Amino acid sequence: MNENSIQNTLKSLIDQTYQVEEQYKALNHSYESLREFTRDIIESMGAAIWVREGDKIKLANTMATKNYEILSLIDPAKNAQEIQFGDKFYAVKITKKDKNEIILATDISDEKRSARLVSMGAVAAHLSHEIRNPIGSISLLTSTLLKRADDKSRPIVEEIRKAIFRVERIIKATLLFTKGVRINRAIFSLGALKSACEAAVSQYAYSKEIKFKFENFEGEMNADLDLLELVFSNFLFNAIDAIEESEDESGEVALRYAFEDGRHNFYISDTGVKIDPSVVFEPFKTTKLKGNGLGLALSVEIINAHKGSISLQNEPKVFTVSLPA
């Protein structure tokens, strides 16, 4: 083989090497792209995913890493199961491939909560229907008894009437919550809303000395007066209960109105105990000594139906209800 042949052969080998290198780079880039694409899919699935070989974790997405303790609760002998971890519920599916186990844990807490609320709502609605008629009769008889009571008996009958008023409101709220909120708008004066709130407070039973302040209720708005009265009386009652649960012998509740930036804003504050924000708007869940946890959840539905919003700050403790004009 002459020198030219050797050089040509060498040049051909070098060119082939470059070609192989370029093909390797392209293949490696494709592999990395596929790996990144697969990782993105796994991350976006909204579930915790582990790939396990024996006791060794070969792959885990971010959600799986954050909830690693779930693995200890999973029974490897069951391909499908449901587990509870803290206050969360997970549906677990195990798929076996060769020596690997693919474990998928999907958070089903919202579905469980919705099913529980539907069940509780159905029971509550049934009980409310059953209770409404006898409570109506008792209320009528109490009103008659109050007219005939002497000065000594009148305070006792008044307390009975206030207790019945509370039960009637619970029944009304429960039926409204289970049937759904429909608003009937009409123009009314804010003074009418103030009077309705004052009347509701006068019917509520409490033992401490509480000062009530209703400020700036001037002007008009277009909304459902009956439903808004229910909303604000719920807030006022919760404020009273918060003061009752505090260590102070007295307290103050304030409901202030302001028209700001084209919105009707209401500010409800009290000097009672603080509220746990994690449960304050959840139906049938409450940290109060009194109450069923339904009032504020229903208030949220009513305000949402009005295209408004409710917010809470605890330092100082103020609820803000904002409604569009």
Image (cartoon, rainbow, N blue to C red):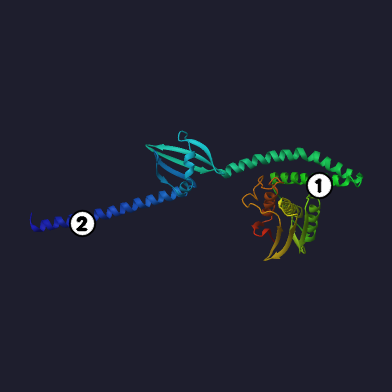
Amino acid type assigned to the residue bearing label 1 in the image: Lys
Amino acid type assigned to the residue bearing label 2 in the image: Asp
Q: Callout 2 environment at 10 Å: few (<14), some (14 to 19), or many (20+)?
A: few
Q: Earlier in the sequence, mark 1 or mark 2?
A: 2
Give the spatial CA distance, label 1 vs label 2: 97 Å
Quadrant in which residue 55 is drawn? top left
Residue 92 image position (x, y, % from top left)? 49, 39
Q: Secondary structure at mark 2?
A: helix
Residue 15 shows which numbered tag?
2
Q: Secondary structure at mark 1?
A: helix
Residue occupying the far left of the picture: 2
Residue occupying the far top of the picture: 77
Badge nearest the viewer, 1 or 2: 1
Foreground residue, 308 or 286? 286
Q: Quadrant of the N terminus?
A: bottom left
Which residue position holds label 1? 162
Q: Is residue 190 visible?
A: yes
Q: Callout 1 environment at 10 Å: few (<14), some (14 to 19), or many (20+)?
A: some
Residue occupying image coordinates x 73% and y 38%? 127
Q: Is residue 184 visible?
A: no
Q: Do callouts 1 and 2 mark residues in contact (Cβ within 8 Å)?
A: no
Give the side of residue 307 with respect to residue 171, left or right.
Answer: left
Foreground residue, 90 or 57? 57
Quadrant in which residue 229 is drawn? bottom right
Residue 136 image position (x, y, % from top left)? 82, 41
